Amino acid sequence: MATRPAPRPFTGWHMTAILVGFFVIVMAVNFAMARFALSSFGGTVVDNSYVASQHYNELLAKAEAQDRLGWQPSVWLDRTRHVRVTLAHQDAKLLIESAKAMIHHPLGRLPSQTLVMVGDGQGGMISTRMLPQGRWRIVLAVRHAGDEARYRRDLK
């Protein structure tokens, strides 16, 4: 019959190694997460939240007026990566007089750009240049019959 060696005792050195290892792992994960967060943060949404809050009721009134227009925008990338915009109201296509567009990279890695929009000959608008690869957020202002509406969409 084989004899089993006696188990080694659990000492203070074992406990020290476990605690040090645990805290090394926790600190490594914390530093990695902090680095990822700082490298992907695009900046502040507003520079002064108090000043922005003073105009909140105006923003709500503009949003309600825009909702009353009843416009349904369609914003998409065509196969050539040009931004296309159409506007409809109760399933009737509206003629867009003008459109202004700014594109922003969601994580702020690429600079924001202004897109020049021109008529597509069918009542819609198309950008004059292709959108770079990646995810983009477009902030769009369209005008029809003297009214203006603003929309924000994500494009891939």
Image: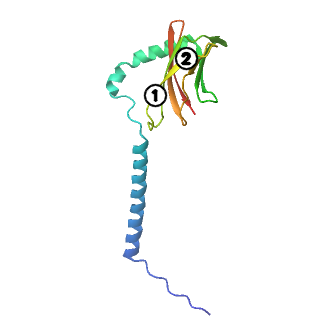
Residue at horizontal 41%, vertical 39%?
41
Measure the C-alpha gap from mark 2 to mark 1: 16 Å
Q: Which amino acid does label 1 sit on?
A: Gln
Residue 108 vs 60, above or below: the answer is: below
Image height of 97 relative to 137, above or below:
above
Write down the quadrant of residue 95 in the picture.
Answer: top right
Tell me the residue at 39%/62% (across/down).
24
For label 1, the SS is strand
Relative to the observer, which residue lies in front, 92 or 19? 92
Query: Which element carries disc 2, helix, strand or loop?
Result: strand
**Left-right relation of 118 to 41:** right
Residue 107 on image: x %, y %:
46, 37
Residue 29 visible (yes or no): yes
Q: How many labels does the image show?
A: 2
On the image, the x and y values in percent for residue 154 come to 54, 30
- Give above or below for 137 relative to 65: below
Name the residue nearer the viewer: 11 or 84.
84
Task: Please indicate whether residue 63 sits to the left or right of residue 121 in the image.
Answer: left
Q: Name the residue under label 1.
A: 113
Q: Which of marks 2 and 1 is nearer the N terminus?
A: 1
Given contact means CB atoms under 8 Å apart, are the residues at marks 2 and 1 in contact?
A: no
For label 2, the residue is 118
Q: In which quarter of the image is the C terminus?
A: top right
The quarter of the rendered structure image containing the N terminus is: bottom right
Residue 25 x/y as whole percent: 42, 60
Q: Is residue 142 visible?
A: no
The three-letter code of the residue at mark 2 reads Val
Q: How crowded is mark 2: few (under 14 residues within 10 Å), some or many (20 or more)?
A: some
In this picture, residue 144 sits left or right of residue 92: left
Q: How crowded is mark 1: few (under 14 residues within 10 Å), some or many (20 or more)?
A: few
Kindly give the residue lying farthest to the top in the view shown: 145
Residue at (40, 30) in percent of width and height: 45
